[in-house]
Amino acid sequence: MSSGEEEPPLSLFVYCTGHGERNNDSTWGLALPTYDPWVKSDGLLEPQHIINTLYGGDPEHRKELFEQAVVVFDACYSEPGAGEAMETRRRQAGVGSVTYDVWVISTARKAQQAQQLAFARAFAKTFSQSDGTQEFIEPSALVERLNSHLPTGRQEVWVSSVDRRSCRALPDPAYMPRTSPGWLDLDLDEWSHLARGRSRPRQGGWFFSGRREEQLRLREFIAGGGSAGPLILRGAAGVGKSALLGHLAVCGKTEWRRLLPPVVRPGLILPDDSVHALVTAQDADVARLARRIARALGLDHLGNAPTPDELCEALEDLPPRTVLLDDLHVAEEPAAVVTELLDPLAEYARTTVIASAGHDAVADAVWQRHQLPVFQLGTDDDGVRAYARARDAGAVAAVCHGYFGAAVHAVDAFLDTRHGRDGEAEALHEAEKQLTIFHRSLLASRGRPDEWCRAMLEPVRAAAACGYDAGLTAELWAALATAADGSGRTYGPEEAREAAELLGAAVTDRGTGEGTGASTGPPAWRLATPAALKSCRPDFAEAVRDCLPVYASGAETEGAPAAEESGIDWAADMGLTSLFAAAARPFEQRFATELTSMAFWAALPGSALARQLDAGGDRLFPERVVKGVRAQTPGRHPAERAFQLKLNLLKSGEDGRGLDPRGFGAGVDILWATPLDGVAVPDLLAVASGANGDGFVVTTHGDASLRLWNLADGRPLDKAVRSEDAGIASHLALAVVDGKPVVAFVADDVGHLWRPLTGRDPEPLAALDGATAFSLHDDGLLAVARGARIEIVEPGTTGRTRSFAVLGSSCVTQVHLGGEAGDRRLVATTESGIVTARVLDTGVAALRRQPLLIPYAQHAVVSSSGRTVGMLDRSGGPFVWDESHGTRSLDVPDVRDGTLAFAVGDSLSAAAGGAQKPWLRLLPLTSGDERPMPRFPLPDQPVALALDADGSHLVVTDLRGVFCLDVRPDQPRPDMADSDPPGPSPTTDRSEEAR
């Protein structure tokens, strides 16, 4: 038994059981087969006989064979026997120099009978419940625990002793030695700590676990059940080859096996005297390795330079031997070692050779050429879990992925973590370092140089360390490897594929196409084993950034904004943008320019956006920008999120940071927006453009005011503030007359005319009093509807008023006067349908009834030219009519949410709705205008929509302000052309059905 640094003297445990007899109450002993209970004078084995036997030896030359002994008398009436044994021990001490200690345990008092197996069961239960806090169990403590498991009224255990020293004869089987065994460190050298499951020499404890199946197979091979010749135990670095060989040596070599602490002995698989030497082949040629084996086998008489023949001759005269050989693949000449040394030892010297070897292409060829049996040593998940639990670090096992070397170092790091630090993070970092060695050994298995292995491993390792799960494509992997190799070497995708093949199960194909708009994509590999966040380095984030495409220098391409400060086109490769986000996250101050780019945030795939927000990546922004950033919905298409983000930024008062949703495939851009709640709730809306391109927007508001805005940039131009008791406008019209905006409106059935930018307040206009509908033309003409009649008047003149009645109608509910001078078109809505007419300078030239759009007349919207009419049916579904195509329905899946606003132009229409989840849809009316993203989320419930004359601007009012979109058709980006944005085709021709 081992008791510390040096080999200890022997201790002895003696167990005596049988039938206990008392002879006239004076003598107790165990009845021998010759015992006669009637005679009672012979046939008893008395305690003095047992104690004298322990002392043993020649009476004249007595020699101590042990230092301490524990003697158990498990028999009836055995208490007197303990006293007799102690008296015999005193007599021995009186006649000689006897120094051994003895403890005698009796299992029954002098009047008690010992129940059969009661002591044995209590003894086993006591030891199984030991907590292992002490190396040895004191007999007095043992007896106390034994009696707790026995009915002491019928049977009580007792201990007798005359010695005062601590008992070291009862080792606690659960005790884990706290110090390193000096005898093993000296003899086993570099394998001592590995065999015990420790990461460094001189560390205490015995924790090797697992590898049961492998040990059983190796036992069979040692016993002669395997192929002839050396057995190659092949495995990657860190998988536990050296630890397994060390464990086999400790358990199989006789002089080491007998010194094993009790905690190691349960479950030993190799028989005693089954292993005889363990040596390393590292950097050894045939001669040096022969010398190492001879020395390990104790064949010192062969001298310092035995030849393989001399070694074989010496071994032929000895019983069969087993030699364990570590790291054969790094011998100077593995082929020569096999042919000149190991094969002769196995064939002629009856020596079993088991040699470990790593993944090495040259060495593998040697094993194959010589047809050596190869036993592949893989990972051991169960063993690693058992190992971690044995060291009270079970949580660490998951990060080691079955690699024993990683587990040993990770558990050490976990247990040695200083107070206040994250032990699991430290363990992960240490496991990653060991797994990196393992991965490099896999990459080097075909003879690739170390520089290549490092460069190819770094991208997948760094991506795993920063938490990027999507995987690297071969092209991206190669580009990052090129950046990681400081020598300037360029790597290609084929090398990345080779690296993935070499790494095997260490990498997982995650080709999900995340961020590309497709459900599947090309192979994309990620490291199957985790990496620690503290392993992230800023140079990897820089390499990823350098791989991102950039805009042409300062150029502004169609549909894309001018280059931002960094010049990065974040939307070109959203998967790469996601990787940069993960890599730069720990270094946000260093990459503040990139991480505060609005285009960067909009380009992040949904899952990456959620991770970035969860990690607090928006803390670099002021609070109002943070609200805009967090307004993005991670599950939406990047084009929708770019729209959301810019709109929220503009509404918060920011400038949008150069963000253009077109660059993400939105097909529109947001030109301007009023600050949130900067104006009273908008109500009516009108848009008009002049001949010189000036555009204006007029809105009415809940405070009875009217406001004029610049259509191009949203600048407030003028405001008409009316009295507090004035009514809110119920009808509104805007036109640009002679280059100046003119506004007509009705409030409380009283007509008004406002000429903004002149400094004058709105003036009464009697021509509009009581009007049910009206429209203002760019030439200054007003079309006014009262009842079934429509009048054409020119405000401020005394010219003849032209009027006509709409036949077959009792009420005109909507009227629009559009088109250019000389081709004015009048569109009127009645209770029975829509009618159109041409308005000439001399009067109404013709009146022509058109097909009904819907059975019952409702509010209609008309394009500026008057050529296109739109209307909503009872369910909120939009229809349009024009002279070329007749009546068509527009397919709007969101119509179930309710359409609240509708606008039409000659080439484009727009619908908005949704009280709970507001939305906006663009609905092209001409062929060839395929909008890449027809639907956009809105932050607030929409109120009104209006398109300008050429259909390039769409103005939207909602409950909290006004904003304007650039809706000119735009070709989708080349990289987005293959994407399938959500939403069906925007239009469906249902003209016949509508008719």
Image (cartoon, helix red, strand yellow):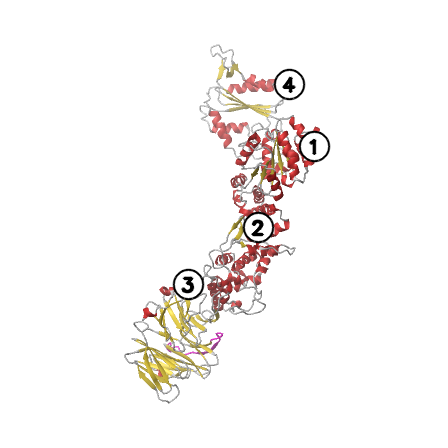
764 shown above or below 479: below
Q: Position of residue 343 (x, y in %)?
A: 63, 34
Instruction: Give how far apart the Cα atoms at labels 2 and 4 are.
Output: 74 Å
Q: Secondary structure beneath disc 2?
A: helix
Label 4 belongs to which residue? 62
Q: Position of residue 169 (x, y in %)?
A: 57, 27
Residue 712 is one of the magenta-drawn residues: yes
Residue 473 is one of the magenta-drawn residues: no
Q: Position of residue 489 (x, y in %)?
A: 63, 55
Q: Secondary structure beneath disc 4?
A: loop
Of the residues under marks 2 and 1, which one precedes in the sequence? 1
Q: Amino acid at mark 1?
A: Thr
Instruction: Give how far apart the Cα atoms at labels 2 and 1 are.
Output: 43 Å
Label 2 with label 3: CB-CB less than 8 Å: no
Instruction: Give how far apart the Cα atoms at labels 4 and 1 are.
Output: 47 Å
Q: Amino acid at mark 4?
A: Arg
Q: How many marks?
A: 4
Say the numbered circle drawn on residue 344: none
Q: Residues within 10 Å of mark 2 (few under 14, many from 20)?
A: some
Label 1 belongs to which residue? 307
Instruction: Give how far apart the Cα atoms at labels 3 and 4 are.
Output: 102 Å
Label 2 with label 1: CB-CB less than 8 Å: no
Q: Nearer the viewer, mark 4 or mark 1?
A: 1
Of the residues under marks 3 and 1, which one precedes in the sequence? 1
Q: Amino acid at mark 2?
A: Glu
Label 2 belongs to which residue? 498
285 shown above or below 99: below
Of the residues under marks 2 and 3, which one precedes in the sequence? 2
The magenta span reads: 711-728
Instruction: Say which of 473 and 4 sits in front.
Output: 473
